[in-house]
Every structure is written in C-alpha cells, then in structure tokens.
Image: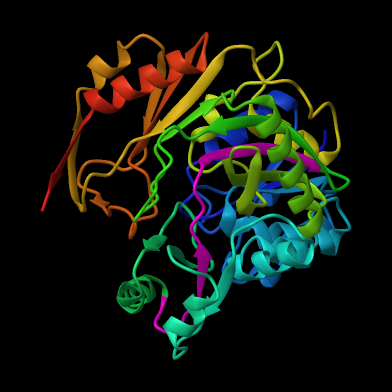
Amino acid sequence: MPKAVVILPSNTYRAADFIKAAESLGIDLVVASEQPAPFDMGDRYVHIDCADPVAAAEAIAALGETVPIDGVVAADDQGVMVAAHTNSILGLRGNTPSAAATTRDKLLMRRRLAAAEVDQPRFAALKPGDPADSVAADVGFPIVVKPLDRSASQGVIRVDRPEDLDPTAARIRGLVGEGATLLLESYIAGEEIAIEGLVADGELTVLAVFDKPDTSTGPYFPETLFVTPSRLPAEALAEADRVAGGAIRGLGLSSGPVHVELRVDGNRARIIEVAARSIGGLCSRSLNFGLMGTTLESLILRNAIGSGRTDLRREPSASGVLMIPTPRSGTLSAIANQEETRQIEGITGMDFTITPGGRVTAPPDGERYLGFVYARADTPEQVESALRKAMATLEVQLEG
C-alpha cells in the first residue's frame, strides 16, 4: 500500500476530503498537522508547526526513515514550504524549496516572473519609510496594494489617488505588521479567471478553468462566484493557458497542484497570482473528473505518489461554487433560509465553516469564508443563475 503525507494547518477546511480520497485510492495516509492528535494514531500522525517549515519537514522525514513515504501534499498555503522541504530531504517528487518560496512571497513571485518575461502587472515594493509617491510613480495609478504573504484577498485594496496611498498602506500594515513591505501593482482591467491544474515534470495540465462572473474593480476584491467551464472565447483561453504555463516554468515549479489567477482583456492574459496548491476553501467540492466522479484531492494524491492517471477530463456538466459573502464584521447569529436555498434548482449542497457565535470579519480584513454553496447544471449560465438565487436567498444574520 502506498503511503502519502498530507500537511494540514490548524485552520484548513480540507482534512476530511483528503482522508476520504486516500481511502478510496487505497493510500495509507499520514496526517501532519499543527493540531495535537485527537487520539493515539501512532506513526500515522506527526505534530508539526508550519511556521517553522524546516523543523516540520525534519519531523516528517524522521518518520520516513522507518516508514517508506511515497509522496507529500500540502492542503493549503501554510503547508507549501513544509512539503517542499520534506520532499527535498526525502528525495521525493515535488517543488524545490526555492521554487515553492516564490509562491509564498508575492514580491519574489513578481521578480521571478519579470525575469522570465511573463505578462503581468507593473509592480514595485513599498518598504516602511519609503516615499510612497515616488514608488507609486513607477507603477502608475490606479494601484492595487497587497501584503506579500496573505491569501483570500486579505489586505488587498485598490487606490486611485496619491493622497490615499499612505493611509491605505497604514491600514494594511495594521493587519500584517508595522514593519511589513507591501507590493504595489498596476490595476488590470478585464475578466478574471482561475486555472486549476497539476504540474508534472514542469509541465502544466489544465484540469478546469473557472470564470469569476463578479470580477471586482475594487476597492476590495472578495471572492464570490466561481463557474466552470469558462465562457471566454477559445483564443483567450488558449492565451491564458500559454501564459500560465510560462509562469509555472518561470517560477521553477515542477510537480503538484497549482491554482493560477489571471485577468484577461481581449486576447491578452496577465498573471495575478500563482499558488502551489489547489483551489482554496472547500471550492474543490464543485469539481469531479472522469466517468466515476473522481475528486480533485484524488488526482492530487495520485500526482504526489506518481501513480495512475492525473489528466482525467472534468465532468461534462457545468458546475460552480458560491463563497457566501460577508456583508460586514460582527458575531454570526445564523445563516437563515437554508432549506429554501437547498430547494433551488441546480443547487447540490452547502457547507458552513463558521458556526453561530463565531466572529466574522468582512473583506479586506478577513481571510475566512462563512461557507460554500455548490451548483451543477447543463450550462454555465444555469449554474450561475442557481448560485445567484442562492446568494439572494441566504440571509447572513450578524450581531455587533
């Protein structure tokens, strides 16, 4: 029986999906997590700290000295560096620590992509004490200001006027640290898409392309709707595929899942983000592959251990996911009208990730989703319609 390690940070939603996938594939799964083991799991559990990826990798590798390990997978961003260091120590397929680091530092990513001549926004680094006006002049307004290491659009804010840049930078540093370097990027118009793929031997296989029908123009950039297959013209999608592949090679990524976000304006595609992990939250539950409904997590585990097909075609029906919007910050009382939402034609399920009584933080300060609603139908238009009805029906009730 092949053995794989899945790295599960304390705030991940995805433990159950990877465990279920491993069981279906006959893979003996080892969990490496920041949470203490719920019970004595012996050599099937390693307690780690993702904030120290080298030490975490050494702890996993120590297990590999006595129990053969065939592959290592990071469920979320926080485990990417741990997986890379573990694969390096054990000599397994995977991204090198140097390549993985480019996806965990947005400024480093921009510099590597620039060196590889990959189409992307103009950019500059804003360090504490730098004259913001002169740094911004090299980029040009409107500007998107970002922290270097956050996901889910946390701290991402568009600035249109020079006088708003300093207070915006101060606000973001209030989230991520007063001494933080920030990334300034030129704002890119166009439709935003997300490519979900797997990399093997440095080459990208595209598994799905999501439209983001509610592409934001700012000032904040919350995620809401993802719908696949994309409705963009074939020429635009081919260009997005080409640019994404160039980004993968430019960053030196060699193996594993990737989530690539681009903006497409006409037939021009430019890179927004590249992550060395699969789509975030529980969005992967909107995807199935092949005739047997293989899950994305199953493909990721197969890729990690080098076993079986990982290029299965996505199911013929359209599908999508709604990340339930957070209208404001407060304490969650309830999410009402759930049964009415389940009755909407095309809706296939819902998952909630914050329970009543939990604190909710609205964009751009928050980084957690309230939950996810899934839809499936014959066409992307029908999927989008179902998800919009769900968004209008669900009522998020907050206190405070």
Residue 163 appears in which quarter of the rendering? bottom left
Say if the magenta span includes residue 251: no
Q: Which residue is found at the position 72% from the left and 65% from the top?
A: 114
Q: Position of residue 386 (x, y in %)?
A: 37, 17
Residue situated in front as seen by the camera: 388 or 115: 115
Magenta segment: 177-199
**As drawn, which residue projects farthest toward the left?**
400
Residue situated in front as seen by the camera: 133 or 301: 133
Q: Position of residue 383 (x, y in %)?
A: 45, 17
Figure check: 347 above or below 256: above
Decide if residue 93 is on the left or right side of residue 319.
right
Figure check: 174 above or below 150: below
Q: Which residue is found at the position 55% from the left and 16% from the top?
A: 318
Decide if residue 295 is on the left or right side of residue 63.
left
Q: How many marks?
A: 0
Residue situated in front as seen by the camera: 136 or 262: 136
Question: Is residue 127 shown to the viewer in this render?
Answer: yes
**As drawn, which residue projects farthest toward the bottom?**
129
Q: Which residue is found at the position 62% from the left and 63% from the top?
A: 104
Question: Is residue 57 shown to the viewer in this render?
Answer: no
Q: Position of residue 332 (x, y in %)?
A: 20, 44
Figure check: 373 above or below 274: above
Q: Main secondary structure of the magenta part?
A: strand
Say if the magenta span includes residue 194: yes
Q: Which residue is found at the position 44% from the left and 54% from the top?
A: 153
